[in-house]
Amino acid sequence: MKSFTTFIAASLALSVSAWTQTVSHGEALPLSAKSTEVRQLLNQAWILDSDQVEQAQAIEVMRKVVRLDPTFAMGHEILAQISLDPAEQVSEQKQALANRGYANASEQIVIDWFQNAADHKLIPAITNMNDALHQYPRDRWLVFLANSWLMAQTQYERAATVYEHSGITDSPGLINNAAYTYANMRQFSKAYALMDKYVALMPQDPNPQDSYAEILRMAGHYTIAIDHYKVALTINPQFYSSQFGIADTYLLMGDETRARQEYDAAFKKFPSLPELDCIRWKTRQATTYVYEKDFPGADKAFQSLADYAHAKHLSQVEADAYRQMAMYQSDNHQAMALLTKAESALRDGANVSVINAHQETAQILRTRVQVAIRAGNSLAADTAAAKLAELSLNSDDKVIDSAFNGAVGAHLFYEHKYKQAIPHLEEDDNSPLSLKLLAAAYQTTGYFAGAKRTQETLANFNDPSVEQALVVPALRKCLANPTCNVGMKDAALQIKH
Amino acid sequence: MIVVPCLLHGKQLAVVTDTANPTTNLSAAELIKLFNAHIHTWADGRPVLIVVRDPASADMDLVLRKLFNMTPGQARVFIEAHKPSIIVAGSDDAVLRFVATNRGAVGIVDLYSLTKNVNVVKIDGKLPVEQGYLLRGN
């Protein structure tokens, strides 16, 4: 599964706010929607998607928009960006491009931005985005799109700059996004100030409380986070993400038993979740056993997830369940057998797009490299790394490239080629496994500030994943022990090895 | 609710010139000489004007570490000694504006700030989006 979101929550603003800076066009990006009804629906979609984070409802509204106005290219583009269905994302992007000729010049720049991004032409995509922002720096939906896209690219500083330049201070959706931007930059005082504002603007909506909880959790304030989740549920008992948020928080607190109880209660309370949400939380429930080092329990839970995915013909989910099982196995033969199962599941190719299949293949190969290194089997590591290199060379995809760099970086690290490993590990900065090696490589090569910063980042990781379970709890324990120097210890161990 | 990871921020920096500059590629050694003020003119004879962010900024930390093995303090002294051929700008937008409007200017910006008003120069034949590009890191 991808380690970051593949969708961008888009939104719409048709109102005109007062500003006087010199830009070449008007304030709001002009939209070529044909009717008043469509414009009203766009505004409704904005509120649902950005302010209330009711994505399913927003998507329904946007589907209505493109039914009413089928040549409205920006309508298709927005639907492509907010859809949670990979097939719809692809088909709507095609529709946006097919109807580009009906769009005005500004809309065409936005369509080109996302088409270039979809085609992995990153530099033209960036210049398109900045071109649109230069013309309409205060258009709230454009700012929201840019902020969301940059967040998905983990470009938080640029996302913050775009928000700050916009000068928009009264849009709940933008405030919510900006708070997450600052939280990811670990500027929590700014994030909390924005959250206070978001809560004040929408006191009767559960999402501000849910977001506040998640940001507090990112900062490690677990107990207060749970309080905010509970407030969200008081406002709307059907806001299921808060119910599962409580379970996730107990998991991160290290109370795996309570976390499982909360997951069970949440699944019982919400038996018909959207499929992707259901799988996400089933995966986290299985992960509780990995945190607990109850590996037979983890095997049982992940196998159950794989069986569920198989029954539902979700090949990528099934493959990823087997891949995650392989990661924590102490028996390398068993790990390799599970990876073979993962590849077999993926070959079935049910309900998986080509790009998602390639990304999953990359993750499996990366895990193959790691297991081979662990087993001291250089030949198997080289073979998997070579396949991964070929995939990476032909893809220009961030997920695949990260997997490749993580694998190569680990391989070089274990050959004690620390300087050569560093640039590769730096390219895989979403992975706790790579960050752990990166901190040790920095330390060994004398870049102590980098080692310290990387360790701090790792210690503050709050992503309930198998990767985190395998790295972060042990690191936190070590950092809390004054006699334990993680970087030096790791480096020394590797040199000895 | 919004789903985001909590991460170190991978940076990609772009070397940019004005759009009239015919240079499309520099070797890492040429880039270092250029920013060390050892190269004073471009191939077409125009004087080199260097514009950089404050040495204490995160982007410049990466540049100083990867290219010059200098501390921010050393970089400040170096810049002071090479005025006016090296200029410090307060933001990426300011770097881009300066480069776009001054023939012979060269600067370094965050890849995600790029505009169509400047050229991106390859380093050792690689663009910032390519694997093995020099100015990538944390």
Image (cartoon, coloured by chain):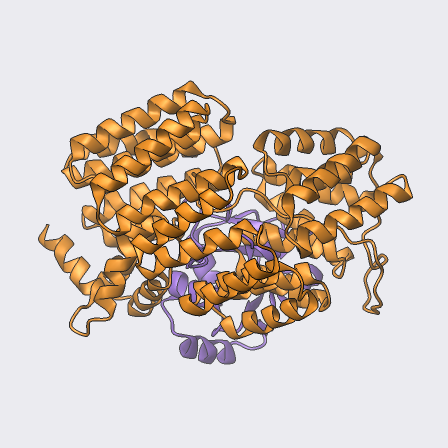
- Answer above or below: position of A357 versus B125: above
Question: Measured from the top left, where is residue A260 in percent x and y?
Answer: 35, 49
Q: Residue at x 41, y 54 (%)?
A: A248
Along the line of sight, which residue is nearer the eye, A144 or B33? A144
Along the line of sight, which residue is nearer the eye, A371 or A126? A371
- Answer above or below: position of A47 versus A331: below
Question: Measured from the top left, where is residue A420 in percent x and y?
Answer: 28, 50
Q: Would you identify the image quadrant in which residue A7 lies?
A: top right
Quarter of the C terminus of chain B within the rendering: bottom left
**Chain B rendering hue:** purple
Task: Tell which chain the image draws in orange.
Answer: A
How many numbered circles are shown? 0
In the visual, does A260 lie left or right of A34?
Answer: left
In the visual, does A386 lie left or right of A238?
Answer: left
Q: Residue furthest top?
A: A348
Question: Measured from the top left, where is residue B90 in percent x and y?
Answer: 60, 73
